Image (spheres, rainbow, N blue to C red):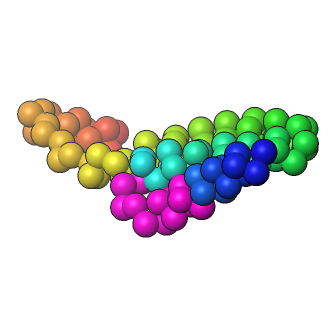
Amino acid sequence: MRIAFFVLSFISIASAVMVVTLKNIMRSALFLSLCLISVAGLFILMSADFIAVVQMLVYAGGIMVLILFAILLTQKITGGLKPQANEQKMAAIITAVTVLAV
């Protein structure tokens, strides 16, 4: 029991440090989920099963999905937006001017 506590505590602290120090947002989010799961393991060791289940469902599940969607939608991982090439630029300008004129 004592060894499991120290192992989970070390995993929790080490993953929390990795969350703060990593520059890659995706890896930081994965270490955050590891930290939250290890905290749920600590709750299980303290015989707080309900709080451990809530920790797993709400934080490690729901919040991490929101964080990952936010990362993917801001495109911080891919390095930003790629320049768009448009071969129909002149047709678009003519259509826009025609629509604005009407």
Q: How many numbered dots are placed on residues in this image? A: 0
Q: Is residue 58 left or right of residue 6?
A: right
Q: Residue 86: x, y in percent? A: 13, 37
* Residue 24 percent location from the top left of the image: 36, 55
Foreground: 90 or 69? 69
Q: Residue at x 59, y 45 (%)?
A: 33
Q: Nearer the viewer, residue 86 or 94?
A: 86
Q: Residue 22 placed where, x, y %?
A: 40, 61
Q: Is residue 91 above or below residue 9?
A: above
Magenta-highlighted residues: 12-25
Which residue occupies 28% across, 52% down? 80
Whether residue 94 is visible: no
x, y percent for residue 38: 66, 46
Looking at the image, is 11 positioned above or below residue 99? Answer: below
The residue at 27%/52% (across/down) is: 79
Q: Quadrant of the N terminus?
A: top right
Give the camera-side residue of 9 and 57: 9
Image quadrant occupied by the C terminus: top left
Whether residue 61 is in magenta: the answer is: no
Q: Name the residue at 12% across, 33% down.
A: 88
In the drawing, does residue 9 fall left or right of residue 69?
right
Q: Is residue 20 left or right of residue 7?
A: left
The image quarter in which residue 59 lies: top right
Residue 22 visible in the picture: yes
Residue 58 picture quarter: top right
| Magenta stretch prevailing secondary structure | helix
